[in-house]
Amino acid sequence: MALYKLLRPLIHALDAETAHRATIAALGLLPPRALPQFAPSLASDIAGLAFPSPVGLAAGFDKDGEVPDAMLGLGFGFVEIGTITPRPQQGNPRPRLFRLVEDQAVINRLGFNNRGQAAALDRLGRRKRRGVVGVNIGANKDSADRIADYVTGVAAMAPVADYLAVNISSPNTPGLRNLQAGGELVELLGAISAARAAGGPPIFLKVAPDLERGDHERIVRAAIDAKIDALIVANTTVSRPPLLSRHGRESGGLSGAPLKPLALDALRLFRSASGGELPLIAVGGIASADDAWARIVAGASLVQLYSGLVYHGPGLARRIADGLAQRLEQRGMSSIAEAMGSG
Ligand SMILES: Cc1cc2nc3c(=O)[nH]c(=O)nc-3n(C[C@H](O)[C@H](O)[C@H](O)COP(=O)(O)O)c2cc1C
């Protein structure tokens, strides 16, 4: 943290997207490291995968799967790369990524900029498999059949993914979130189940925090019926709680501290809708062990973060993991599973 405090003004002197590219390039230069060790109490088995720590990297940081091993080496218990679309696409015009420093937040309207499935498949295919690396899949903006894009994604990326995350909650591809609506969701999940090969990776569904009353029950029912293995709650919000930063009115998805109460509420609603039948992965505004603990006791099996890294540096995942192990010990609990939903 001390080193990051020193470097942060330099990194923040660059525009947010240039800083991000420089960070990925620097991470790509790190020598390979052994996977970090975690307290045994942090280990858990979710959807048949062995997670050494419940603290993961959320999608969007490593869109093309350039640095999953460096991120595991920094202390993440799992890493989700993507969103990857079938064909490469540029995303929206710049500027499209904003730091809201006074709010400890980020607004992005990147629009799934990525090099496409073939490039990701090639890159991931060449890496030595270790740790838990999930692949988040999406649809191209100009696709005539978005459901077909997810089907393609499931089939193409399964061989290199420990899990697949079906992202239908990004606010930056117009109309994408309509796939969360009744009939469309059932059709999408049906097509995905049909495309799934026996013995393939588990499939998680990533949802938005901006849902209406009744949506949570409906989504849980559709997910359970289609044998989805877990829900990721949640993506960025299109809502705008009061913000201090001059960038607060930029369009796009808001993440970081102002998303925290909304994401926690959404988690609670999904927990009460699912009654523990479907594992939940909590994401949105997590920046400390207290934040992560609050999600776990509210019913999350795992947590993820992204925006917290911008303000708290690369050691954050490790610090949160250590803080969680401490909290378990203080309460005489032997595992995260024991704490899960205990609030
Ligand atoms: C710059 C940026 C890009 C993102 N890109 C994606 C993406 O491609 N796919 C996705 O599912 N979520 C994406 N997200 C959402 C995050 O995965 C996460 O759900 C959200 O930021 C809330 O977590 P946080 O507050 O810890 O950042 C992105 C978030 C940010 C800040």
Image: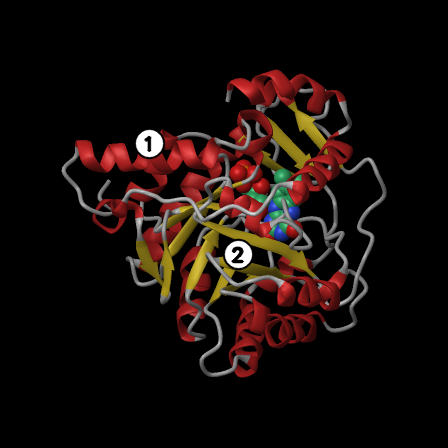
* Vertical position of residue 13 compared to residue 94: above or below: above
Q: Nearer the viewer, residue 29 or 177?
A: 29
Quadrant where the C terminus lies?
top left
* Vertical position of residue 97 compared to residue 179: above or below: above
Residue at (67% x, 75% y) in the render? 152
Judged from the image, the quadrant occupied by ligand 1 is top right
- Pointer 2 residue: 206
Instruction: Give the SS element for disc 1.
Output: helix
Question: What whole-number distance in Å separates the C-alpha atoms at marks 1 and 2?
Answer: 26 Å
Q: Farthest residue toward the left?
A: 332
Residue at (28% x, 37% y) in the render? 325
Q: Is residue 161 left or right of residue 26?
A: left
Residue 230 in the image, given as x and y percentages of width and height: 42, 61
Q: How is the image coloured?
A: secondary structure
Within 8 Å: ligand 1 and the Cβ of disc 2?
yes
* Vertical position of residue 18 compared to residue 229: above or below: above
